[in-house]
Amino acid sequence: MDYISPIGILRLKASEKGLSSIRYLSHEQAASEPAPETPSSEEARNSMALCVSALNSYFAKQWGAFEQIRSKIPLDLKGSAFQKKVWGTIYSLPNIYPICISYSELATLAGKPSAVRACANICGQNEIPILIPCHRVITVNGQLGGYSSGIFRKSWLLWHEGLLAKGSKSNILLLQPPQTR
């Protein structure tokens, strides 16, 4: 299923276990790639419906509704135990203050302080962006770092959440969570 968002087309996929991916597409990609078939299982359709509701809340800046719906979406994560631990740590970020953390803090929270590069790579392998907010992981010096779907999307998501000033030349992040703005 394709979801039209302010930041582009998001292609959603789900299995009977839960939401399995959200992929950013350009208009050209969306036109040239066949849209995925509607999932046959009721569980997959329910996961996609919850995801659409969560994304609607997210883009409307309804943070409380987003958090409530997001927490009800079953996720079908594919990866090693460490990858799943890192993604779980990132998933919990809305409950941590300040909301953005560094890659080195992520490695420490995931139980492997020396695995900073591994954690950065795992962020890049996140199949469920926005719901697993890897865009909130930044460098230790406050720079945005990378983002598998493009730094402009990471910057837009942080701006949308109120963590980065619009048009900011610096990457100094604001420290208040979006719920308090």
Image (cartoon, grey):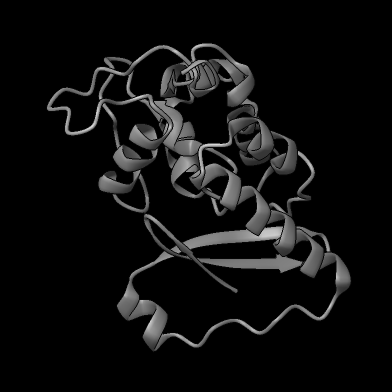
Q: Is residue 78 visible?
A: no
Vertical placement of 112 versus 124: above or below?
A: above
Vertical placement of 97 versus 159: above or below?
A: above
Identified at 73% across, 43% down, the residue is 69
Identified at 45% across, 21% down, the residue is 100
Identified at 25% across, 17% down, the residue is 172
Q: Is residue 73 visible?
A: yes
Screen quadrant of the N terminus: bottom right
Image position, residue 107 (x, y; %): 52, 22
Image position, residue 145 (x, y; %): 29, 33
Residue 44 horizontal side relative to residue 142, left or right: right
Image position, residue 158 (x, y; %): 37, 33
Q: Quadrant of residue 108?
A: top right
How many numbered marks, from 0 up? 0
Vertical placement of 152 versus 176: above or below?
A: below
Q: Quadrant of residue 157?
A: top left
Near-viewer residue (122 or 6): 6
Identified at 41% across, 79% down, the residue is 30
Residue 8 horizontal side relative to residue 96, left or right: left
Near-viewer residue (68 or 35): 68
Residue 174 horizontal side relative to residue 125, left or right: left
Residue that lies at the very extreme toward the right in this rendered image: 42
Image position, residue 181 (x, y; %): 46, 18
